[in-house]
Amino acid sequence: MRRVSKWTLVRLVAVSVLLSVAYFICFSGLTATSDSVRHFDVHGSTEFHNLLLDTSVADCCDGEPLKMELPASDFETLLDIRDFKFRINQPSCRGEPEVLIIVHSAPRNWEKRMQIRKTWGSDLQGHLLFMLAAVDSPMLQLSLESENDQHHDIVQGSFRDAYRNMTYKHVMSLKWALYFCPGVRYVLKTDDDTFINTPVLIRALTQGRLRCGMKKLLLCRVWSGVAVNRTGDKWMVTQEEFNDNVYPDYCSGTAILYSQDVVYALYRKAQETPHFWVDDVHITGTVAGELNLPQETMESGTLSIRFTHNTVKCDHSLEKDAPSWIRSFLFSKHDLSTSDMAALWSYVKNCAMTP
Ligand SMILES: *[C@@H]1O[C@H](CO)[C@@H](O)[C@H](O)[C@H]1NC(C)=O
Ligand SMILES: *[C@@H]1O[C@H](CO)[C@@H](O)[C@H](O)[C@H]1NC(C)=O
């Protein structure tokens, strides 16, 4: 008798636990239903659209191939690091990719890299790489190596992967582009929490003005008059690190499109410019400024996309006079979750490209 009632009790407890789990799932499901219409501003731009539509450059003059002159010691040097190596590396670009896409990624962001491989990084007429740096944990290193054995798309530098080492990573990316993909016309730098509309990007690079292999191109969202952050911890910058109180105009690191001659010029100039760790300010602001290289802006014209339960409603209200593929955006804001990525990919596949 006692035994039976004990088991009854156990069952009762189990059932009530199950019920509350089920209730919790339903309840949070319902909450999600009412809250999950999310609004996104996606940067598209009229300037960018003009760039795509302008076919006024009559001849596709590829011009002179890039002439690089780098000292023999350069390969094993990364700014002031004298014994730089690629711990994990990839063979040189084969064929002629339209673009080399370089994604700055933190070593632990395996899930984000997987989501990019499954969404905008899949089925690409370009070359996609994830840029990482060294890690302290041998376990993590092993898992990065096996991830790379599977996907062959990781480049890992020998300096420590850290927030304040971002400029090293940026210069490493430029270095990789020069040494291993010298013939590529464009390089796109982005982060692992950003969505790149790759079908539109590829069309943009093969049509309009960009198809001719533009030189001196530094295309991005430009930040102007940004005050230096003297408070907080993650982003705090001291007077010694950066003396002025306002940054020069610089590119948001979310997505930067460089022509290969710009990659080379920035790479060279960075060697002799005093180091500053905020990489987008440093490379696309200070170093580009030394070269008198203006950033070309892709601002304005935002396309808002409504997400409902991670399925996307096509919002055509902003799409007016341009051909449909051009009405689309080129890249998202940063800080997307992996489900946002999936939703945007379904938008690109199902809405943005339809005539
Ligand atoms: C940046 O990398 C260098 C070289 O690996 C390392 O000595 C340094 O500690 C790193 N910086 C940070 C903030 O981890
Ligand atoms: C400045 O730092 C604070 C605290 O870290 C942060 O909340 C804020 O967004 C930063 N502002 C800028 C412009 O980076």
Image: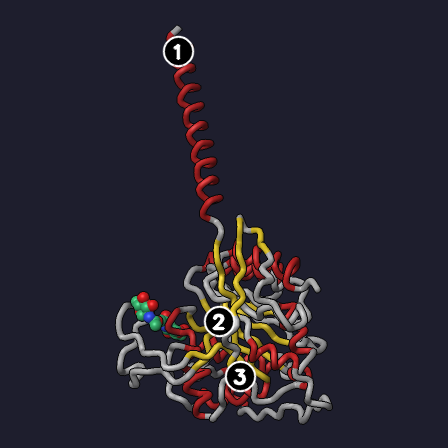
Q: Which residue is mark 1?
A: 5
Mark 2 residue type: Thr
Residue depicted at 52% across the width and 84% down the height = 296
Dot 3 or dot 2: first in sequence order is 3
Label 2 to label 1, Cα distance in Å? 63 Å
Which of the two residues, 217 or 274, is positioned nearer the viewer here?
A: 217
Q: Is residue 355 left or right of residue 233?
A: right
Mark 3 residue element: strand
Mark 2 residue element: strand
Which of the two residues, 319 or 312, is positioned nearer the viewer here?
A: 319
Tag 2 near tag 1, CB within 8 Å: no
Q: Tell whether circle 3 marks a residue whose Cβ is less than 8 angstroms from ligand 2.
A: no
Residue 218 circle label:
3
Mark 1 residue type: Ser
Residue depicted at 38% across the width and 78% down the height = 277
Mark 1 residue element: helix
Tag 3 near tag 2, CB within 8 Å: no
Residue 241, located in which quarter of the rendered image? bottom left
The quadrant of the rendered image in which ligand 1 is seen is bottom left
Q: Tell whether circle 1 marks a residue whose Cβ is less than 8 angstroms from ligand 2.
A: no
Label 3 to label 2, Cα distance in Å? 13 Å
Which of the two residues, 264 or 70, is positioned nearer the viewer here?
A: 264
Dot 3 or dot 1: first in sequence order is 1
Vertical order, 318 against 299 (above or below): above
Residue 254 circle label:
2
Residue depicted at 64% across the width and 62% down the height = 122
Q: Position of residue 189 (x, y in %)?
A: 53, 74
Q: Position of residue 236 (x, y in %)?
A: 30, 72
Vertical order, 313 against 15 (above or below): below
- The C terminus appears in which quarter of the rendering? bottom right
